[in-house]
């Protein structure tokens, strides 16, 4: 049929055209139709290949579906077998469980002692953990122990293991230095969330200050101590706060878990002891000490000023009557023609006149350092009288009743010695300085007499 169409078209063209034109056009038409036929054959072959691929893919998918269906059926069969096996095991376990429950009920009476021990141990451990500052880092960890201590049923093995784990965890945490954030109540009463460094279960610091762990029922947080330890301990706390986990820094440890730090808050400073226990005698001793110190400072200034003037006069060629040595030299310049004996007497008189101002005040300082320990002894007697009065009224049952009088006796004694010892040392120093200046004046006067005697002989 493909060959009949071109032949029919060729015949029609021959009938309507001239022989030459018909022959040329017939050749071109034949070439175009051949290409068309070849294209048609190629398209048919391509379409046949596509159809074959589609049929092959369909066959493969059908076979895959059959394989999946077979696998699903096999899996279903296996699950049915497993279900039957588990059902048998469940029935057997139910029988075993019933037997174990019967045995447990029979042996329940023998575990009563263990139950009591567990409850007591849970209560004791709860008290220890509540008092531990690790609870601030891990809040709510004692809830289980509280429930276990109040439970009426026997504890299970996992619960016993949890009880043991709580004890071991506390032991492990007592040897760690940990940084965490927790509420901190400042000395002013403000409550803030701050970074806290916990040194085991012994100390806690924040911002370079020591903290106390409050275990009251109404609140559970760190409290800044109203009074901090000495400066070197505060520096240690600051270094620990700023250190990294790999650093090794010195740190003081309160092994009493805060009792020493609480005692620091309750203890009084020396100034507070003097103010509270010294009494009137203590204030008098302090007044004597301040007066003696002022006198010593004034006398030291006077002696050093006089010594500076004498030193300048020894270097100068002209006489300056503003210093003791200048006034002694002026005696010679005012009496150049007197005999040696008279000049010596006049110089001795001038030295005596200059010696008195140099030694002024030293005797009063000596009186002060003698009176200070006597005032301390007076305070001691007053304190002992107060102590004996307390013993007469309340007996010796409570030592704290006698502590006030004894503290007064000791504080005043210490104050007297603290004032007397420095004043004694200062008096000795100032007296030596005054004697040295007088010796310089005597040497200069002796030098003048020796020079005149040599000139006149």
Image: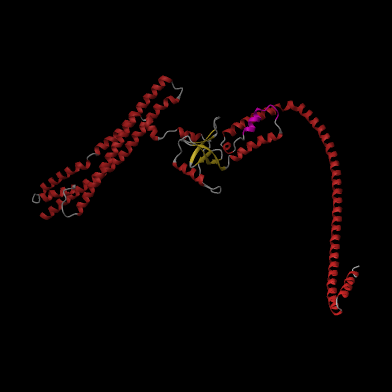
Q: Nearer the viewer, residue 116 or 222?
A: 222
**Residue positioned 83% across, 37% down in the render:** 89
Left or right, 34 with respect to 400, comes to right
x and y, in percent, of residue 388 in the image:
39, 23
Q: Nearer the viewer, residue 408 or 235?
A: 235
Q: Main secondary structure of the magenta part?
A: helix
Q: Nearer the viewer, residue 259 or 27?
A: 27
Query: Vertically, is 5 above or below 386?
Result: below
The quadrant of the image that shows the C terminus is bottom left
Magenta stretch?
A: 142-154
Left or right, 259 with respect to 76, comes to left
In the rendered image, residue 143 lying in the magenta stretch gets the answer yes
Total marks drawn?
Answer: 0
As drawn, which residue projects farthest toward the left?
337
**Residue positioned 25% across, 36% down in the render:** 364
On the image, which quarter does residue 417 sit in? top left
As drawn, which residue projects farthest toward the top?
393
Mark yes or no: residue 457 visible: no
On the image, which quarter does residue 423 sit in? top left
């Amino acid at each position: 049929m493909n060959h009949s169409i071109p032949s029919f078209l060729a015949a029609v063209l021959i009938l309507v055209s001239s022989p030459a034109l018909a022959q040329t056009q017939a050749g071109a038409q034949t070439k175009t139709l051949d290409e068309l036929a070849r294209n048609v054959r190629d398209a048919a072959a391509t379409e046949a290949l596509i159809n074959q691929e589609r049929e092959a893919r369909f066959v493969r998918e059908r076979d895959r579906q059959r394989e999946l269906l077979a696998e699903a059926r096999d899996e279903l069969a296996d699950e049915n077998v497993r279900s039957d096996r588990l059902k048998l095991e469940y029935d057997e376990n139910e029988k075993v469980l019933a037997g174990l429950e019967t045995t447990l009920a029979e042996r329940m009476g023998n575990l009563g002692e263990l139950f009591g021990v567990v409850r007591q141990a849970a209560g004791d451990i709860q008290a220890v953990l509540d008092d531990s500052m690790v609870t601030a880092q891990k809040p709510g960890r004692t809830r289980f122990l509280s429930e276990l201590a109040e439970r009426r049923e026997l504890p299970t093995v996992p619960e016993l293991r949890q009880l043991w784990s709580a004890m071991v965890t506390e032991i492990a945490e007592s040897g760690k230095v940990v940084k965490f954030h927790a509420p901190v109540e400042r000395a002013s009463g403000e409550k803030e969330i701050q970074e806290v460094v916990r040194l085991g279960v012994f100390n806690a610091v924040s911002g370079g200050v020591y903290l106390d762990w409050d275990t009251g029922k109404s609140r559970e947080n760190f409290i800044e101590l109203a009074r901090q330890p000495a400066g070197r301990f505060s520096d240690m706390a600051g270094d620990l706060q700023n250190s990294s986990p790999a650093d090794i820094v010195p740190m003081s440890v309160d092994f009493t878990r805060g009792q020493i730090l609480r005692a620091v808050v309750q203890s009084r400073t020396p100034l507070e002891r003097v103010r509270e226990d010294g009494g009137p005698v203590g204030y008098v001793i302090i007044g004597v000490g301040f007066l003696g110190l002022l006198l010593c400072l004034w006398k030291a200034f006077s002696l050093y000023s006089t010594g500076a003037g004498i030193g300048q006069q020894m270097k100068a060629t002209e006489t300056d009557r503003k210093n003791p040595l200048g006034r002694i030299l002026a005696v010679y310049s005012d009496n150049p023609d007197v005999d040696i004996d008279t000049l010596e007497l006049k110089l001795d008189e001038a030295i005596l006149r200059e010696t008195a101002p140099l030694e002024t005040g030293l005797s009063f300082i000596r009186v002060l350092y003698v009176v200070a320990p006597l005032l301390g002894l007076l305070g001691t007697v007053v304190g002992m009288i107060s102590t004996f009065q307390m013993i007469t009224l309340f007996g010796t049952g409570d030592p704290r009743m006698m502590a006030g009088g004894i503290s007064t006796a000791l504080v005043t004694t210490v104050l007297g010695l603290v004032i007397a010892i420095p004043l004694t040392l200062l008096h000795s120093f100032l007296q030596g300085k005054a004697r040295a200046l007088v010796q310089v004046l005597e040497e200069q006067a002796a030098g003048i007499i020796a020079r005149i005697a040599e000139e006149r002989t």
